[in-house]
Amino acid sequence: MSALSHGDSAWHPLSSAESPVIPMPLPQPALIPQPQRCTVLEGAAFTLTKDTVIHASGALAPSAQQLASRLRAGTGWALPVVADPAPGAGGGSRIEFRLAPPALPGPEAYNLQVDATRVTITASAPAGAFYAGQTFLQLLPPAIFDIFPRAELKWTAPAVAIEDAPRFRWRGVMIDSARLFQTTGYLKRFIDVMAQHKLNVLHWHLVDDQGWRIEIKKYPRLTEVGGKRRETVRGHRINLLGGDGVPVEGYYTQEEIRDLVAYAAARHIQILPEIEMPGHAQAAVAAYPELGILPQAREVSCMWGIHETLFNTKPATFAFLQDVLTEVIALFPFEYLHIGGDEAVKKQWKEDPATQAHMKALGLPDEEHLQSWFIRQIEAFLQTQGRRMVGWDEILEGGLAKSATVMSWRGIEGAIAAAKLGNDAIMCPNPFVYFDYFQSGSPDHEPLSIGGNLPLAKVHSYEPIPAELTPGQAGCIVGVQGQLWTEYTPTANRLDYMAFPRTCALAEVAWCPRERPAFPDFLGRLRTHLRRLDVQDVRYRAPLEYLPAPDGAGTLNA
């Protein structure tokens, strides 16, 4: 039987008059991250005008004010936020924030309804209302994110019904300010872009062998000495080109940090400070040599890579660290504090008689267990201060502190081990989320980097929950985080280039359900999304997957 025949009946094509009308699906808006459910509705678009009124009260009023502030920056219109708008206010055009009962799935969940005259945002907590506002902004033309007002444009948003909530509660990006000191202005712009992607943790790497960037009032030499680097050795690994002769210095005052923390909190971003120990300590030991092992003075390192300088294990050193952490805790209200714990080369401990005697007195079999003991002392102190400890996956060696959260960076094994012990873990595996890696397989055509190859598609493909875990163990994986190490990013523009659009893909991994849209779908939305980055002067790298668009989106502008 012919595929076109039905029994003995002949097949007759329908005339155009008889043909059924098959409606074309309405185009989906280019949203990143993609909401859980987004239905494009028939009907007229919503038009924002200078007479639009924003209605919000109580707990959701600050989220409404944030939206009004961004709308004013993009349009030049100071739209009022009122608790009880007068009848007819806004000329029929209104944005309403509604407090929902706790039926929504978590404080970051929201519903967003847009029709011709009204935008309705429903959330059970301020965070959800804020994220609904970020989604609404992406429904408007990309110029809404412009750093200059564009009042001449027509500001329309398609009619949609959106239900949305995040997959993970920890959606982070780490910025290394120890190697490359960024201005607070740059960090605020970065926080703004993080918020647009619904990322909620900025992990701030503040100290390392090459610089100490946080003011500690009790120990001023940490910034007077530790905050200054004589120069930076150029080149990479075995192909070193000598020092550049350019001094590097800078640190963040406590006043600047408080301001930045408040700025981030208003955008529902927590800042996680990292104070490295027992390794990555050379800048601190350069400032206060008595904290180290060797008697000779050290300078703040001018070279990258792993260093041998460790803190010693004397009581005075722990007193110093507790003093430092006390000042840090006063600046950062986040319940977590990162203590590093990575890449601690044990050579100095092995060769130091005093350290060996201390280890023997403690009944410890080796230096790995000494590091575990060291970390446990710090964890115990943090607990007295109401803080939870986070560390890189090396803190597993020698035994894991019972309340510690592990950042698994050397692949996924650290997270698997932590989850099987019942500890929380954050997925940071270098093959998938280390944004200091090259972005293509042709490093000769890329700026100098640490190595590796992490193209955009690989970031987007990442699945954070290891298959080896049971459902119960998988609940210990609390989130995912991208890393921006800055050894090979000498400028803020280069940092943008390494971060974006890979951070856009990370946001999708962190927010969307496991069965998220495929990479080609993401690329289609990204083309519009890059215009949003363009108007904010984000110097991203153009994806190799498509050529620059005629209108300039996707331009290689680093």
Image: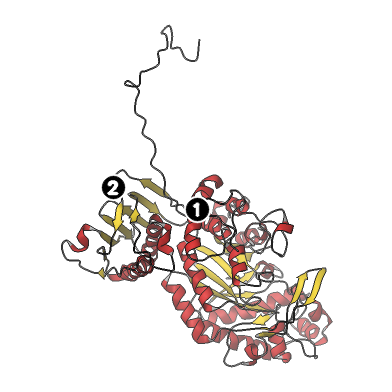
**Residue 547 pos. (x, y %):** 59, 49
Name the residue at 73% across, 91% down: 290
- 384 or 489: nearer the viewer: 489
Query: Dot 2 surroundings within 10 Å: few (below 14), some, or many (20 or more)?
Result: some
Residue 405 in view, yes or no: no
Above or below residue 194? Residue 548 is above
Tag shown at residue 551: 1
Looking at the image, which is closer to me, 136 or 347? 136
Image vertical order of residue 445 relative to residue 186, above or below = above
How far apart are the alpha carbons under marks 2 and 1? 27 Å
Q: Which residue is mark 2?
A: 44
Check contact, mark 2 vs mark 1: CB within 8 A: no
> In the image, is residue 48 above or below residue 516?
below
**Measured from the top left, where is residue 142 in percent x and y?**
43, 58
Judge whether residue 249 can be spotted in this image.
yes
Mark 1: which amino acid?
Asp
Q: How many marks?
A: 2
Q: Identify the amino acid type marked 2.
A: Ala
Viewed as shown, does residue 446 lie left or right of 546?
Answer: right
- Chain-order first, disc 2 or disc 1: 2
| Badge 1 density bin: few <14, some 14–19, many ≥20, Cα 10 Å | few
Image position, residue 81 (x, y; %): 27, 69
Classify the position of the C terminus by image quarter: bottom right
Where residue 240 appears, x then y in whole percent?
A: 80, 71
* Comparing labels 2 and 1, the label whose residue is closer to the camera: 1
Secondary structure under the numbered disc 2 in the rendered image = loop
Q: Residue 363 versus residue 84: which sits nearer the camera? A: 84
